[in-house]
């Protein structure tokens, strides 16, 4: 399968999720007015990674999917923050970048799933 045909099989939500992660990470690091920065940080730290990871599962029920998004987002944030704390490298910027990277990696895994199907 060529690279161009693989790109056409990747669904828009996967691409939008990955792009949103990149944009929101950059906006969070650059700085926004406080209410917007809070919303962007919550999206980058919990919602985007949770959504990206939940899309890797075969769950089709909306309520269960929404719960899974929150649970996976919070669990991932807990693991990343705890690991950074124990390694003495915790900073909010590093946490934002790490969670953005996890989101992008999960989107790449989803894109591979979509290309294979």
Image: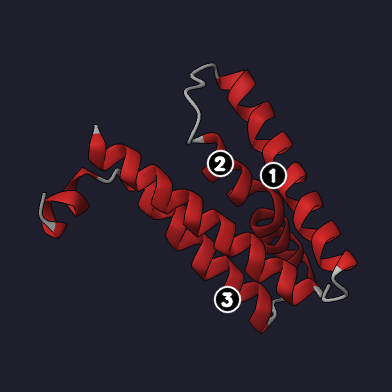
From where the camera sits, is residue 13 visible? no
Residue lying at 52% horizontally and 21% vertically, measured from the top left: 59
Residue 94: horizontal and vertical position, in percent? 72, 74
Residue 12: horizontal and vertical position, in percent? 32, 46
Q: Is residue 53 above or below residue 7?
A: above
From where the camera sits, is residue 2 visible? yes
Cα gap from disc 2 to disc 3, whole angstroms: 21 Å
Dot 2 surroundings within 10 Å: few (below 14), some, or many (20 or more)?
many
Q: Is residue 59 above or below residue 86?
A: above
Residue lying at 24% horizontally and 37% vertically, measured from the top left: 116
Residue 74: horizontal and vertical position, in percent? 76, 44
**SS of the residue at dot 1?**
helix
Cα gap from disc 2 to disc 1, whole angstroms: 8 Å
Q: Are marks 2 and 1 in contact (CB under 8 Å)?
A: yes
Residue labelled with disc 2: 53
Dot 1 surroundings within 10 Å: few (below 14), some, or many (20 or more)?
many
Give the number of the mark in front: 1 or 3. 1
Give the number of the mark in front: 2 or 3. 2
Residue lying at 60% horizontally and 70% vertically, measured from the top left: 25
**SS of the residue at dot 2?**
helix
Cα gap from disc 1 to disc 3, whole angstroms: 19 Å
Residue labelled with disc 3: 26
Q: Is residue 97 above or below residue 9?
A: below
Q: Residue furthest front?
A: 87
Residue 63: horizontal and vertical position, in percent? 63, 19
Judging depth in this view, the residue of 24 and 81 nearest the camera is 81
Residue labelled with disc 1: 73
**SS of the residue at dot 3?**
helix
Of the numbered discs 2 and 3, the one sitting upstream in the chain is 3
């Amino acid at each position: 399968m060529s690279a161009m045909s693989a790109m056409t099989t990747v669904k828009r939500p996967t691409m939008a999720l990955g792009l949103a992660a990149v944009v929101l990470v950059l906006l969070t690091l650059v700085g926004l007015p406080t209410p917007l920065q809070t919303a962007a940080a919550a999206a980058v730290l919990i919602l985007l990674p949770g959504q990206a990871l939940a899309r890797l599962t075969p769950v089709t029920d909306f309520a269960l999917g929404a719960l899974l998004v929150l649970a996976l987002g919070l669990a991932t944030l807990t693991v990343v923050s705890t690991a950074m704390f124990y390694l003495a490298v915790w900073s909010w910027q590093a946490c934002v970048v790490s969670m953005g990277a996890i989101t992008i990696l999960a989107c790449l895994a989803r894109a591979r799933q979509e290309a294979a199907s």
